[in-house]
Amino acid sequence: MTVATTFRIAPEEGADFSKIERVLREKFDVRDFRIEDLAFGIKVARVLVLSEDGETGNVEKEIRSIDGVGSVEVESQTLL
């Protein structure tokens, strides 16, 4: 089964969202990538990734390992 997972990614200070997006698109089946204001000038990326059932934990770990990523949180998940 395919799973659609939305991740909230907060970058490290000074990180470039375009570099993070490029790496994500190279590694995963990214269906949506949006940069949103969180608060007080802080921005986060909301990313929709399709993966196989049971792979979400691995995807999250790989996202954490990308240079410039400060934190990753699963916001939502649904089966397709």
Image (cartoon, grey):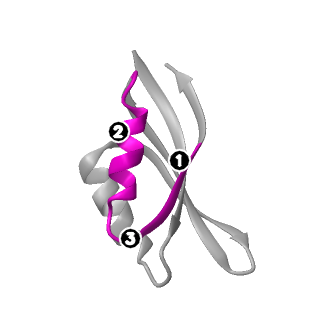
> Disc 1 to disc 2, how far (Cα)?
13 Å
Q: Which residue is mark 2?
A: 58
Q: Amino acid at mark 3?
A: Ser
Residue 33 in the image, given as x and y percentages of width and height:
48, 54
* Local secondary structure at mark 3: helix
Q: Quadrant of residue 64?
A: bottom left
Residue 63 in the image, given as x and y percentages of width and height:
38, 53
Q: Earlier in the sequence, mark 1 or mark 3?
A: 1
Q: Is residue 9 left or right of residue 52?
A: right
Direction left: furthest residue: 26
Q: Are marks 1 and 2 in contact (CB under 8 Å)?
A: no
Q: Amino acid at mark 2?
A: Asn
> Disc 3 to disc 2, how far (Cα)?
22 Å
Residue neighbourhood size for the residue with mark 3, other residues' Cα within 10 Å, grouped as few (<14), some (14–19), many (≥20): few
Q: Amino acid at mark 1?
A: Phe
Q: Which residue is mark 3?
A: 18
Q: Quadrant of residue 31?
A: top left
Q: Which mark is in front, 1 or 3?
A: 1
Which residue corresponds to the image point at 41% horizontal and 37% vertical from the top-left?
Answer: 57
Which residue corresponds to the image point at 51% horizontal and 61% vertical from the top-left?
Answer: 71
Which residue corresponds to the image point at 33% horizontal and 59% vertical from the top-left?
Answer: 65
Direction right: furthest residue: 40
Residue neighbourhood size for the residue with mark 2, other residues' Cα within 10 Å, grouped as few (<14), some (14–19), many (≥20): few
| Quarter of the figure with the N terminus | top left
* Local secondary structure at mark 2: helix
* Local secondary structure at mark 1: strand
Which residue corresponds to the image point at 45% horizontal and 25% vertical from the top-left?
Answer: 3
Quick check: 66 above or below 19? above
Start-end of magenta stretch: 53-74
Q: Which residue is mark 1?
A: 7
Task: Choose between 58 and 7: the one closer to the eye.
Answer: 58
Residue 73 in the image, given as x and y percentages of width and height:
56, 50
